[in-house]
Amino acid sequence: MSSRPITEDDLNGLIDGTLDPDRRIEVSAYLDAHPDVARRIALHSEQRDALRDAFARVIEEPVPTELDLSRMIAERHRPRPAPRWAMAAAAALLLCAGGIGGWSLRGMAPASYEGVQALAREAAASYATYAPDLVRPVEIRASDRDVLAAWTTKRVGRPVGIPDLTAAGYRLMGGRVVPTEHGPAALFMYDDDRGTRLVMLARPMRSDGDIPMAPHAQGDLNGLAWADRGLGYSLVGAVAPDRLHPLADEVRRQIRSEA
């Protein structure tokens, strides 16, 4: 028998039927000794089977055109002609702004910073979607790290480093590719084996410049977002800012050392 502790990945693997025979025996023995956990896993299995049964008829149907993700993203990014009154107003504004234009830009945030703010919102939304999932929080598990790295590189269009936070007490659970308004993004999830999860989201930015790390928060969720060499990153979690910041610094250090 292995001395490795039973993790959420093992429990999810039992539900999905992906464990090897020896590990399945160990997990089953663990559930026999922990009936409260066994009841929770049985409930998740029932929910999974119910979802499969409910969507069995439509699972093989083609995605409706109006719900096709690539078309939706293309439509969102397609420039739309401005109405004539807006074009006229813009022309008038340009004529009047010659002498004061430089000063009027002082209080405006650069587009690159707005891009990082958008990335922060996307990371928070991805965390809210996948971090609470006890059945399939990741698509590719950490045991297939090379496959995960190759898949995210292909979909994002650039290599995305997968940081190692083991020394800080967080193990890699795995990851997936998620859609955003700005194209595909790589999502990597970490867990401290006590139920606290972190999500790192990374995607290309429109600007190739570097942007300093900036904090963001939404309710109990805290995060830090930044950009390096044209890739934007955001690390988020229900973790106090003073604990999250060193983790984000370590993520950035590892990514820079791999570049």
Image (cartoon, grey):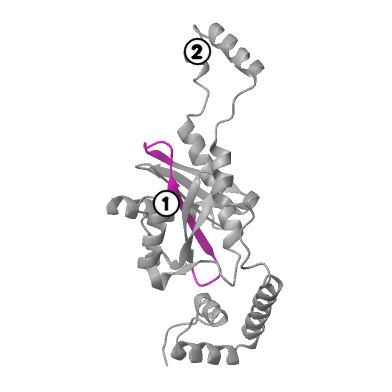
> Which-is-in-front pick, marks 1 and 2?
1
Q: Position of residue 46 (x, y in %)?
A: 68, 80
Which residue corresponds to the image point at 63% horizontal and 64% vertical from the top-left? 61
For the residues bearing labels 1 and 2, Cβ distance under 8 angstroms? no
In the figure, 34 relative to 242: above or below?
A: below
Give the class, few, some or many, for how many residues have Cα within 10 Å of label 1's Cα (few <14, many ≥20). Answer: some
Which residue corresponds to the image point at 52% horizontal and 16% vertical from the top-left? 104
Residue 63 location, quadrant: bottom right
Which residue corresponds to the image point at 47% horizontal and 45% vertical from the top-left? 225
Which residue corresponds to the image point at 59% horizontal and 71% vertical from the top-left? 134
Q: Earlier in the sequence, mark 1 or mark 2?
A: 2
Q: Which sits in the foreground, 171 or 59?
A: 59
Say if residue 219 shows up in the picture. no
Q: Position of residue 42 (x, y in %)?
A: 65, 83
Q: Secondary structure at mark 1?
A: helix
Q: Position of residue 44 (x, y in %)?
A: 65, 77
Residue that mark 1 sits on? 156
Q: Which sits in the foreground, 49 or 141?
A: 49
Say if residue 104 shows up in the picture. yes
Q: Position of residue 67 (x, y in %)?
A: 63, 52
Q: Which sits in the foreground, 75 or 50?
A: 75
Task: Check if residue 202 falls in the magenta segment.
Answer: yes
In the figure, 139 relative to 12: above or below?
A: above
Is 234 displayed left or right of 253 in the figure?
A: right
Q: What residue type is disc 2 on?
A: Gly
Residue that mark 2 sits on? 101
Task: Check if residue 194 falls in the magenta segment.
Answer: yes
Gap between marks 1 and 2 measured at Cα: 37 Å
The residue segment tinted magenta is 192-212
Q: Quadrant of the N terminus?
A: bottom left
Give the class, few, some or many, for how many residues have Cα within 10 Å of label 2's Cα (few <14, many ≥20). Answer: few
